[in-house]
């Protein structure tokens, strides 16, 4: 029996993990096909451009072919050549150039991942707000029911001469304002649906929203894509400074040329030849702007390093702010639960009094509607928590 219980627990755990993975895959694939293709092409373009940059130190081999005709001697000739001029030593510039291209590729890749996750986060945030708007509509309908009852009670009191007309006017105005707010919520929902359609071709009703939890501060810092990108940019700037420095140091190049020529004129055939030359060259540019160029790359390196420190502070403040906002929302939920208990008791008491004829059924309905409003408020606050947590999740890698 004990073994059976263990199996049940394992099965439940596996089911929860599987469902979480399904939701993660579903939401990771929430963007429309066109949006996905755009990002795929951007990633592919980044890889290809980085590959080109990493090999940019290799000069192309020059191939040439020529053929000429002359009517003077009724002759023709042709020639082709292969020429190579390839640097093999740039005082470390080749090595640091390759490292620079790798850092640039990784930084751009991290930035593209951040852009994609931000767009995914926007789509999920819209889904949360759609759900929140529907709850607010439901809440507003209960409020309008209370407004209708309030108008009826105040009209009865006004007709009996027990209440001034201004109170009745205020009740009518309140109902009109709430009905306008309900229409505005309908418009808001339509706008959210349109915004979602621009990002995704999925049916919002078929998607399951994730249940996000607060990750640890260390995990958020370690997986933060913005911080990762800025660190890679600082690394990129460091290599760029070394490449710039090496640009003004000696360069060793190997050179080689192969030429093959032929003439159709028998008197010129003695000069037909094929030959090759080879050698090496040491060069170093003397540029008046070299010092400024090196200093500018050094300043960029220092600026990138400071930006990493600034990003660390930003990441810490983001986490701190979200954590505090979650704490406030939790307090709102606690207050709403307390109100729910109060309204539940008041509704029970009012209903009993209404059954005894000491209160009207309208009084019981008001308590019932107010009770439902506070229940809905709790659901809205829970969605607000998810929206706040989403701000963290979109900035980290592989969290949704």
Image (cartoon, rainbow, N blue to C red):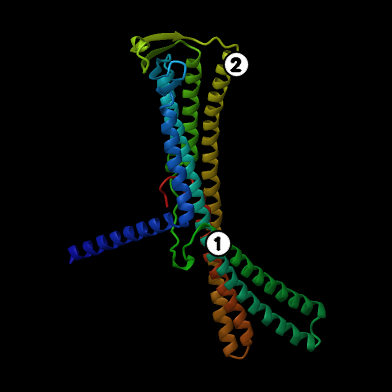
Mark 2 burial class by Cα count in 10 Å: few <14, some 14-19, many 20+: few
**Quadrant where the image shows the N terminus:** bottom left
* Nearer to the camera, 332 or 275: 275
Q: Quadrant of residue 363?
A: bottom right
* Location of residue 385 with respect to 337 vertically, above or below: above
Tell me the residue at 37%/11% (across/down): 268
* Nearer to the camera, 149 or 274: 274
Q: Secondary structure at mark 1?
A: helix
* Nearer to the camera, 312 or 323: 312
Residue at the disc numbered 2: 292
Residue 339 seen anywhere in this rendered image of the structure: no
Image x and y of residue 242, in percent? 47, 19
* Location of residue 74 with respect to 189 vertically, above or below: above
- Answer left or right for 38 relative to 356: left
Q: How many marks?
A: 2
Q: Secondary structure at mark 2?
A: helix
Image x and y of residue 140, in percent? 62, 72
Whole-angstrom CA distance, mark 1 to mark 2, is 53 Å
* Nearer to the camera, 80 or 142: 80
Residue 62 seen anywhere in this rendered image of the structure: yes
Tell me the residue at 68%/72% (across/down): 178
Image x and y of residue 336, in percent? 56, 65
Tell me the residue at 53%/61% (across/down): 197
Which mark lies nearer to you, 1 or 2? 2
N-terminal of the two: label 1 or label 2? 1
* Location of residue 155 with respect to 275 vertically, above or below: below
Tell me the residue at 58%/20% (across/down): 296
* Location of residue 369 with respect to 293 vertically, above or below: below
Residue at the disc numbered 1: 129
Mark 1 burial class by Cα count in 10 Å: few <14, some 14-19, many 20+: some
Q: Which mark is residue 244?
A: none
Image x and y of residue 338, in percent? 54, 66
């Amino acid at each position: 029996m004990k073994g059976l219980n263990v199996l049940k627990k394992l099965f439940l755990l596996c089911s929860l993990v599987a469902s979480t993975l399904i939701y993660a895959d579903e939401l990771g694939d929430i963007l429309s096909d066109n949006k996905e293709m755009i990002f795929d092409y951007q990633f592919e373009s980044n890889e290809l451009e980085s590959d080109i940059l990493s090999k940019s130190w290799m000069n192309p081999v020059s191939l040439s072919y020529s053929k000429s005709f002359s009517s003077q001697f009724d002759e023709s000739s042709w020639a082709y050549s292969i020429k190579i001029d390839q640097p093999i030593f740039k005082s470390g510039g080749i090595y640091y150039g390759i490292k620079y291209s790798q850092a640039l590729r990784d930084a751009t890749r991290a930035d593209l991942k951040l852009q994609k996750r931000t767009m995914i986060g926007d789509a999920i945030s819209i889904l949360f707000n759609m759900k929140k708007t529907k709850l607010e509509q439901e809440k507003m309908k209960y409020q309008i029911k209370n407004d209708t009852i309030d108008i009826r009670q105040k009209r009865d009191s006004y007709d009996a001469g027990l209440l001034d007309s201004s109170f009745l006017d205020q009740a009518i105005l309140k109902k009109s304002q709430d009905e306008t707010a309900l229409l505005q919520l309908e418009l808001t929902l339509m706008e959210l649906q349109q915004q979602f359609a621009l990002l995704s071709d999925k049916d919002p009703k078929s998607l399951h929203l994730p249940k996000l939890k607060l990750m640890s501060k260390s995990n958020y810092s370690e997986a933060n894509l913005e911080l990762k990108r800025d660190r890679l940019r600082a690394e990129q700037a460091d290599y760029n400074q070394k490449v710039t420095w090496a640009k003004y140091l000696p360069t060793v190049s190997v050179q080689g040329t192969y030429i093959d020529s032929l003439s159709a004129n028998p008197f010129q055939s003695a000069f037909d030849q094929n030959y090759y030359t080879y050698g090496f060259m040491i060069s170093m540019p003397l540029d008046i702007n070299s010092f400024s160029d090196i200093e500018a790359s050094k300043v960029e390196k220092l600026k990138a390093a400071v930006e990493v420190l600034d990003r660390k502070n930003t990441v810490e403040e983001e986490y701190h702010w979200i954590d505090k906002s979650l704490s406030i929302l939790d307090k709102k939920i606690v207050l709403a639960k307390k109100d729910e208990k109060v309204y539940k008791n008041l509704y029970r008491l009012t209903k009993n009094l209404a059954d005894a004829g000491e209160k009207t059924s309208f009084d019981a309905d008001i308590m019932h509607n107010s009770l439902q409003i506070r229940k809905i408020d709790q659901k809205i606050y829970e969605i607000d928590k998810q929206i706040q947590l989403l701000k963290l999740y979109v900035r980290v890698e592989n969290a949704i």
